[in-house]
Amino acid sequence: MNSKPMNVLWIMCDQLRFDYLGCTGHPTLKTPNIDRLAARGVRFSNAYVQSTICGPSRMSAYTGRYVRSHGSTQNGVPLRVGEPTLGDHLREIGVRCVLVGKTHMVADTEGMERLGINPASIIGVHSAQCGFEPWERDDGLHPDDGGPMDAAYQNYLRQRGFDGKSPWEYWANSAEGPNGENLNGWLLSHADKPARVREEDSETPYMTRRAMEFIEEAETQGRPWCAHLSYIKPHWPYIVPEPYHDMFGPQDVQPAIRSEDELHNAHPVYAAFTRERYSRNFSREEVRQRVIPAYMGLIRQIDDQLGLLFDFLERKGLFDRTMIVFTSDHGDYLGDHWLGEKYLFHDVSAKVPLIVYDPSAAADATRGTVCDRLVEMIDLAPTFLDFFGRSAKPHVLEGVSLLPLMRQHAVDWPRRHAVSEYDFATDRARVELGLSVQQSRMVMITDGRFKMIDIEGFRPMLYDLERDPNELADIGHEPKMADVIERLRAAIMRWYRSGRNRVTVPDSWFSDDDDLVRAGGDPTLRQGVIIGYWDEAELAAQQALLKAHDAARAKERELSV
Amino acid sequence: MNSKPMNVLWIMCDQLRFDYLGCTGHPTLKTPNIDRLAARGVRFSNAYVQSTICGPSRMSAYTGRYVRSHGSTQNGVPLRVGEPTLGDHLREIGVRCVLVGKTHMVADTEGMERLGINPASIIGVHSAQCGFEPWERDDGLHPDDGGPMDAAYQNYLRQRGFDGKSPWEYWANSAEGPNGENLNGWLLSHADKPARVREEDSETPYMTRRAMEFIEEAETQGRPWCAHLSYIKPHWPYIVPEPYHDMFGPQDVQPAIRSEDELHNAHPVYAAFTRERYSRNFSREEVRQRVIPAYMGLIRQIDDQLGLLFDFLERKGLFDRTMIVFTSDHGDYLGDHWLGEKYLFHDVSAKVPLIVYDPSAAADATRGTVCDRLVEMIDLAPTFLDFFGRSAKPHVLEGVSLLPLMRQHAVDWPRRHAVSEYDFATDRARVELGLSVQQSRMVMITDGRFKMIDIEGFRPMLYDLERDPNELADIGHEPKMADVIERLRAAIMRWYRSGRNRVTVPDSWFSDDDDLVRAGGDPTLRQGVIIGYWDEAELAAQQALLKAHDAARAKERELSV
């Protein structure tokens, strides 16, 4: 430690499965730089996201609150104005909270208008950017028919000579045919071809440089910062430039984690998801063989870029005073369980890689260790506040600081369950099943041993993670599991009950006078409000008690100064 | 109906029990004017408030949302900035939403500051006043040691010659001793004496006149309005001016609804509440005899004032185009069940009087009837929107419009349960029981037959309203009730699941393209986002389907014009 400010660098990938890293056991994908970070920090092997899709998962990450609480249940659903964010909490204590990359935030423009918030004001920008100061905002999708055409990365590509309405689509995320024709990079069949940009001009190196530019600037200011470097890869379009496009081949594609049994007497919601286009395509071996090597190339490119970034941090001495976190917003089925994309809650979708490097000497004893406690993405926001020496705001933030796990060997870790939610109102599956929009909610709960998915109007899905670590058997229909189901249902009920909806006052607001109450006193008298007293004598006795109590406390305070 | 604008007059009393009106069966308390309204409208005999204390109950009434959703769980807990209110929804459709009296709203000044909302701006005032335009705000408590000294009513009293720091406390809510000395009106022992103000200067007539002044002004403007006339009585201080102070006597005091059995093997939470000062005092017959006649006098005064108000409305022709609602924010134990005040969920606390007069001819068939369907206070906000011809906003408002019940004989009423919540973190009972602030939440659910109260860490309380309408036997410990308890627990779980936290987009945002999805189409293609397609052929087929679908829809629209 030294007197320069402490910082947080929070690196997030998009759609990166927990098991596609060297340090998490992939047989052929080497990620030496990420592994190096794991060797210097703690790797959490049971980290769950709070939703299995970008927007809601990230809104939970950036607010430290469950989807149930922040309400942005699907991609594109604006986060309600005024929802407290990590950025708000950090600014309160003088820490810059800066975005470099993706958030998937959609501003609540109606709410902002109702409250008269000018979108161009500093407060308006923070409201619209989920609490971040947007050093660079890039959500990674700029299709010719829809996305923003004026993103900084689009302009960068234009400056580098790539033309067209959306150089992002036509160069960075397209391939080239034998006659120079454009091959649409959204299509899975082209995943084996190189992207049409030089590697240095592709998205991951660009965003890495932007992060370094931010850090250079921030370090001249002497203020603590929390930078969110949010890569948009290895999320689709699955296409990567040379030399990464053919660094991996069919020999690197692991067998799909699936069994024919999964399709027999399947839970209707699971079955509906297996019938989605992406699931049908990813269930074909041809598709897996074509796409997965590109997915691995995108990850390898991230690892190489992190190598450059970590060297840069080392040179600047920032490893001495910067907490560095590496994680992802959710996984990717890639054909496992006859599914593509994410949405459901098998570990390949709902569990993410999480590495936390803490520069404090107090964390030396845990360096290079693996922690198998159940943790959640919402635990990061309170971890950062804790790292900066502040309260984790338990009346607002629903996560728990990870610092005790990093800085002590034995600790009573309070999290007994991890919870994740998914609103499938946007999915074809909801229409196929004939469900209302309000009914289309899933809640996953796991205690580490069992994992249950609760959906209104259906039997639960249930997996035994100990006997069936690949989650190939849904045993939610088995009568002998009734006790487990009842126990997990009760845990979901407790989780619902514990929602932190009372965000405007801390718990101490209620309990500050508990000692007076224990002494038989009546705090309400302080405001001159006299409830349920019979006569002057009863009131006078209580007023005397209050006066004596306050005098004793004042005396104590005096003595303690 | 005529061409002048429609209006809503929403009259709310404070702490008025459902059974202290003539039309709800009180043996000696006559309320001819309120009864007259009931004869012209529908009286709901099973109306529950969403919390059994002023602030949270009112925040639910004014937002149309459960406490679980709006988060203002106790008196004094600010309603988070940006929480959508009835006033917001009404202003959107050009209706003034005006307050005359009490709301118990506490502004989220920290949140407003974070969002840069100037408290003096129109938006700032609406944010601070729970969405109302405050024609007159008066929360009814202005103690010498705490409350606001500059309330309009305080100034009114000063103009009328009542002096002192708080004329509210020393005149309107005090009595006079034999030697002209002040007798503290907060004390129950003085409830039989007249207040030190003339009847016309006491709070109820004052606020009635203010409402008439508002209506006079509003009617010159020709804009529709919703006025909330919110009386602060019969809430304590239990003191009333001549001639109401001795209009009722011990002969009017009904026997307390209680049994010795209630105290044996009592539920620990119930037992703790019986030990609160107000409960111990109200369990004494002397206290009931002294206080209840004053409580009745306060109600009788309200009824007389409503007579004047209704005559005024009649003269102005407003009964032809004004929906008039009469209700209360919660009840008062008055010694029943060995309790004082409110907080717990026996009907005398959680059930309120509710009368709705609908001027529409469509409601003629139900005039003078009693409706025993389960309804909730949060049903009023959607009722008002419905009355003004607008959507009840089901993605935000958790209530259901009552209009179908008023305007049709047979209707499939969707509400199967009523729910009410109470956060007892502020209560001595919480400290006595050694509970954490977060644990101190109660949820009551009733299906009309049974009523269950769920509290983390305790067995449920349970009442059979059919066999035991006075709720004298808590049967939550009886093994034979396990099925009922399980059924109601499941209902609470569904209630939690159905929380409307996604307030920024309506359900149609998700379902607008359901017909396209049913036809096998992919709405995401509209944005140029191409998820999980294998090759050009697969994509082209889907693009053709989308194009054909949109063309067919355009043709349909053309034909329908």
Image (tube, coloured by chain):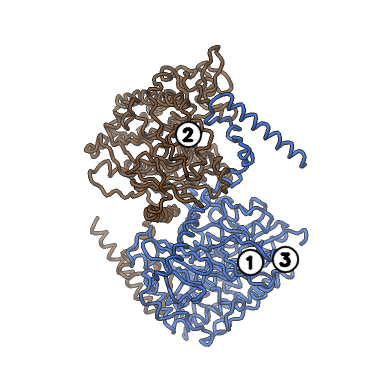
Chain colours: A blue, B brown
Of tags 2 and 3, the one toward the viewer is: 2
**Disc 1 chain ID:** A
- The dot on residue A167 is none
In this image, B17 relative to A89: left or right? Answer: left
Name the N-terminal-most of marks 3 and 1: 3
Give the distance between the C-alpha atoms of the residues marked 2 and 3, in whole angstroms. Answer: 62 Å
Q: Position of residue A60 (x, y in %)?
A: 53, 59
* Crowd rating for badge 3 (residues with CA inside 10 Å; few <14, some 14–19, many 20+): many
Give the distance between the C-alpha atoms of the residues marked 3 and 1, in whole angstroms. Answer: 14 Å
Q: Are marks 2 and 1 on the same chain?
A: no
Proximity of marks 2 and 1: CB atoms separated by less than 8 Å:
no
Query: What amino acid does circle 3 point to?
Result: Leu
Query: What amino acid does circle 2 point to?
Result: Gly
Where is residue B401, by image quadrant? top left
Query: What amino acid does circle 1 point to?
Result: Val
Q: Nearer the viewer, residue B62 or A98?
A: B62
Q: Position of residue B237 (x, y in %)?
A: 49, 27
Indicate the secondary structure of the residue bearing disc 2.
loop
Give the distance between the C-alpha atoms of the residues marked 2 and 1, in whole angstroms. Answer: 54 Å
Q: Nearer the viewer, residue B447 or B378?
A: B447
Q: Is residue A190 above or below residue B249?
A: below
* Crowd rating for badge 1 (residues with CA inside 10 Å; few <14, some 14–19, many 20+): many
Q: Quadrant of the N terminus of chain A?
A: bottom right
Q: Which residue is mark 1?
A: A325
Q: Which residue is mark 2?
A: B340
Q: Which residue is mark 3?
A: A318
Q: Position of residue B231 (x, y in %)?
A: 43, 30
**Disc 3 chain ID:** A
Of tags 3 and 1, the one toward the viewer is: 1
Let me know if residue B72 appears in the view. Answer: no
